[in-house]
């Protein structure tokens, strides 16, 4: 005999993410057997669709597959956290068993990882465990209280000592700190020594020209491919992964992304000043503009063998991009 | 791996395929590991494949499942919780793709301890695709399961060549 359902004051909301409608049906059935009423269940076919639904639906628990087209379950959870949805609970129903990946899911707050094949009781058990404290809250909803959160003072940016090395004008640690300042809590990976070359350029690229005190002409050049522009600019503007990916696909960052990417290139002038060596000089960005990958001067710069720092940046849920800095006149 | 160890592994795979079918199709069903000589495999209406990259051995293997309509109906009606008469072709495809996915995982567990294996996404293949795969791929193991008139085949490829 089935126990009487637990009546909730507010519906418990679930989002089931799986590219198989058949698995969606199995998970949906198991959720309805958890014994809570009322419940609301929505479904998504991949991580990208899920991220769009989450914005409006605000589920209590997301139950997601791992391997899906477009955006995987793990990328979706990482993007969710980047977007500030730290409170949304997530559990995986998957065939994935690679320990390192499962650990990554847990470090992103996955409450459970249930492997297929499973039986309904196992799923009911992990779902019930994941939402049990919400059930108590729902049973006795307190009257709403408006609380004005007192903002904590912003933390000062990390102090990075830049070593003077003309052959590496933008050290990775310094750029890492600059990116952290631009991207806030968005996790990213900066990989150094990934040489930017003409064949790896995107069609449009952002070129920053730097001048320096006591030097004539262009002191240094910074290049961001359009993926890096979208990712750094979009991340700094707190754009959603869907918006950033759309911009990356079209190769057309919007105005705000472009402005934020400009700001980022401008901020790199500080690093170039620090690493310039004796005598001390002050580097500042004179101008930045979009250039085509066919721009002859750009190809010339990319052939430069020394006095350059090259990077690849990877942001889960966004993708990958490249940037490089070249000192032209020492 | 010795022949005995190989057979023991194959028995474990058979047991996991049975468990997986129980989850997907809702009925207990036995899977047999076939030893040489292998039978000629025939294309089935719902045939799906999934590539599997084995990084440690720098090769792309794969898994194929050949599902007859009767079995496809069984698995889809169980997964969607509806009568077989109500099941649409899209439902059959969806359910069989998931069979391929879950079965592949049962097999990946026994390839390099699943540490260095990356599983792709399942895709449905046509009869000519199946011909191409049969001609250009290397079969490592075959499992079969009979139920009523239908036979379900699970093919493990050591080297998997899918038409581009």
Image (cartoon, helix red, strand yellow):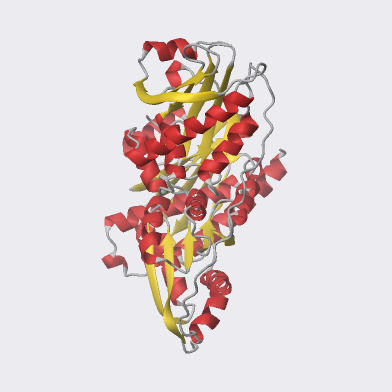
Q: Is residue B106 left or right of residue B43?
A: right
| Figure check: B32 above or below A311 | below
Up/down of B17 relative to A167, above or below: below
Let me know if residue B75 appears in the view: no
Task: Tell me: residue B146, above or below residue A298.
Answer: below
Nearest the camera: B113 or B19? B113
Considering every residue shown, the one lying at the far front of the view is A214
What x and y, as percent, mark residue A277?
66, 18
Frontmost residue, A35 versus B37 = A35
Nearer the observer, A27 or A263: A263
Q: Residue A205: x percent and y percent?
A: 39, 25
At a point 42% along the width and 80% down the height, the residue shown is A10
- Residue at 49 percent of width and 82 percent of height: A138
Q: Residue at x 44, y 16 (%)?
A: A198
* Image quarter of residue A157: top right
Q: Residue sitting at 64 percent across and 23 percent down?
A: A275
């Amino acid at each position: 005999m089935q126990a009487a359902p637990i009546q909730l004051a507010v519906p418990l909301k679930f989002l089931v993410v799986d590219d198989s409608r058949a698995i969606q049906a199995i998970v949906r059935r198991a959720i309805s057997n958890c014994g809570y009423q009322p419940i609301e269940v929505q479904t998504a076919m991949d991580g990208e669709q899920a991220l769009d639904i989450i914005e409006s639906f605000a589920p209590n628990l997301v139950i997601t597959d791992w391997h899906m087209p477009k955006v995987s379950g793990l990328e979706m959870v990482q993007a969710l956290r980047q977007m500030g949805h730290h409170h949304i609970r997530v559990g995986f129903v998957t065939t994935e068993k690679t320990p390192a990946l499962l650990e990554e899911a847990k470090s992103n707050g996955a409450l459970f990882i249930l492997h297929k094949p499973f039986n309904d009781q196992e799923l009911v058990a992990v779902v019930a465990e994941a939402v049990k404290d919400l059930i108590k809250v729902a049973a006795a909803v307190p009257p709403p209280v408006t609380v004005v959160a007192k903002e904590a003072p912003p933390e000062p940016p990390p102090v990075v000592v830049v070593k003077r090395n003309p052959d590496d004008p933008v050290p990775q640690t310094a750029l890492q700190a600059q990116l952290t300042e631009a991207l806030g809590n968005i996790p990213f990976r900066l990989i150094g020594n990934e040489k930017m070359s003409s064949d790896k350029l995107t069609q449009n690229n952002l070129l920053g020209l730097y001048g320096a005190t006591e030097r004539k002409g262009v002191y240094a050049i910074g290049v961001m491919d359009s993926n890096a522009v979208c990712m750094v600019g979009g991340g700094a503007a707190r754009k959603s992964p869907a918006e950033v990916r759309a911009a990356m696909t079209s190769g057309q960052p919007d105005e705000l992304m472009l402005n934020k990417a400009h700001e980022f290139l401008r901020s790199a002038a500080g690093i170039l000043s620090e690493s310039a060596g004796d005598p001390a000089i002050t580097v500042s960005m004179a101008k930045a503009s979009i250039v085509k990958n066919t721009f002859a001067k750009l190809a010339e710069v990319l052939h430069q063998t020394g006095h350059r720092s090259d990077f690849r940046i990877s942001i889960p849920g966004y993708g990958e991009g490249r940037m490089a800095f070249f000192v032209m006149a020492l | 791996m010795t022949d005995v160890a190989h057979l023991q592994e194959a028995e474990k795979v058979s047991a996991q395929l049975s468990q997986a079918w129980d989850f997907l199709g809702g009925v207990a069903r036995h899977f047999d590991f076939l030893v040489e000589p292998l039978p000629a495999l025939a294309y089935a209406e719902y045939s799906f494949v999934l590539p599997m990259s084995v990084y440690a051995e720098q090769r792309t293997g794969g898994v194929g499942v050949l599902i007859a309509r009767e079995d496809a109906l069984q698995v889809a009606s169980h997964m969607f919780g509806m009568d077989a008469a109500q099941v649409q072709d899209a439902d059959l495809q969806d359910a069989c793709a998931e069979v391929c996915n879950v079965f592949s995982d049962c097999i990946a567990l026994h390839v390099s301890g699943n540490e260095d294996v990356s599983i792709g996404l399942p895709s449905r293949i046509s009869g000519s695709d199946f011909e191409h795969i049969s001609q250009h791929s290397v079969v490592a193991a075959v499992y079969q399961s009979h139920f009523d008139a239908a036979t379900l085949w699970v093919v493990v490829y050591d080297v998997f060549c899918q038409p581009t």
